[in-house]
């Protein structure tokens, strides 16, 4: 009796194991003002001049990263209007926008992989963006650290006729 009971326990232990593997692919996430933030949806697009725009959405929040190219490189923020990071929050009180630009905010976007075949982009980012609105309820600076985007799909741009 003991052998059959032991056999039944071992049998159910073996068949009840399963692999529940989840892939976070694509992914866009980081630490916003010391709180973990993850996008629900992220996409990238290439402009006609070769510029790259990555957009990430999470509920009523949106982050847009812009660079002059999709080439593997480090793009410094706060040095031009063609390399920027923008964070927008929309809620019942209105819209709050934080942005970097020429002489405004700082940070960097690092492109680590541009997969032309699979049309994906990967890299990292961090930035300090300044409050662009006169909304006194929001802080003056938004800090994003440890930002990562991984295999974000590059969608074809819509060309105007």
Image (cartoon, rainbow, N blue to C red):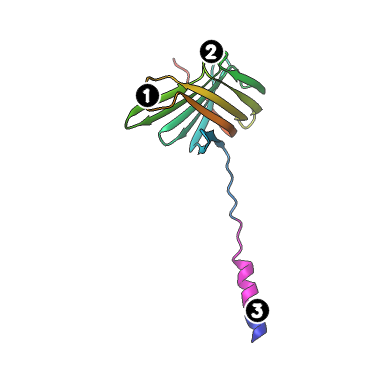
Residue drawn 54% across the image and 30% down it: 144
In the image, is 111 to the left or to the right of 48? right
Taking the magenta stretch, the answer to whether it contains residue 148 is: no
Residue drawn 37% across the image and 23% down it: 135
Q: Nearer the viewer, mark 3 or mark 2?
A: 2
Which portion, as a residue range, is magenta?
A: 7-19
Residue 96 placement (x, y as % from top left): 40, 25
In the picture of the structure, the residue carrying the numbered disc 3 is: 6
Taking the magenta stretch, the answer to whether it contains residue 10 is: yes
Say which of 153 and 78 sits in front: 78
In the picture of the structure, the residue carrying the numbered disc 1 is: 136
User: Where the N terminus falls, by quadrant?
Assistant: bottom right
Please tell me whether mark 2 sits on a helix, a strand or a loop: loop
Discs 1, 2 touching: Cβ within 8 Å: no
**Which numbered disc flags the more N-terminal residue, 1 or 2?**
2
Q: Is residue 25 above or below residue 12?
A: above
- Distance Cα–Cα, label 1 vs label 3: 68 Å
Q: Is residue 114 above or below residue 58?
A: above
Q: Which numbered tag is attached to residue 103?
A: 2
Discs 1, 3 touching: Cβ within 8 Å: no
């Amino acid at each position: 009796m003991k052998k059959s009971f032991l056999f039944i326990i071992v049998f159910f232990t073996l068949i009840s194991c399963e692999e529940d593997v989840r892939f976070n692919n694509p992914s866009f996430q980081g630490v916003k003002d010391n709180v973990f933030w993850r996008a629900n949806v992220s996409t990238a697009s290439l402009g006609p001049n070769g510029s790259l725009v990555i957009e990430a959405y999470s509920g009523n929040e949106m982050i847009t990263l812009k660079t002059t190219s999709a080439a593997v490189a480090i793009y410094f923020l706060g040095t031009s209007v063609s390399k920027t990071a923008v964070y927008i929050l929309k809620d019942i009180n209105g819209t709050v926008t934080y942005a970097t630009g020429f002489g405004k905010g700082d940070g960097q976007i690092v492109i680590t992989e541009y997969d032309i075949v699979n049309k994906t982009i990967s890299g990292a980012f961090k930035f300090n963006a300044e409050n662009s609105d006169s909304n006194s309820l929001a802080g003056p600076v938004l800090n994003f650290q440890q930002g990562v985007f991984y295999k974000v799909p590059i969608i074809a741009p819509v060309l105007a006729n």
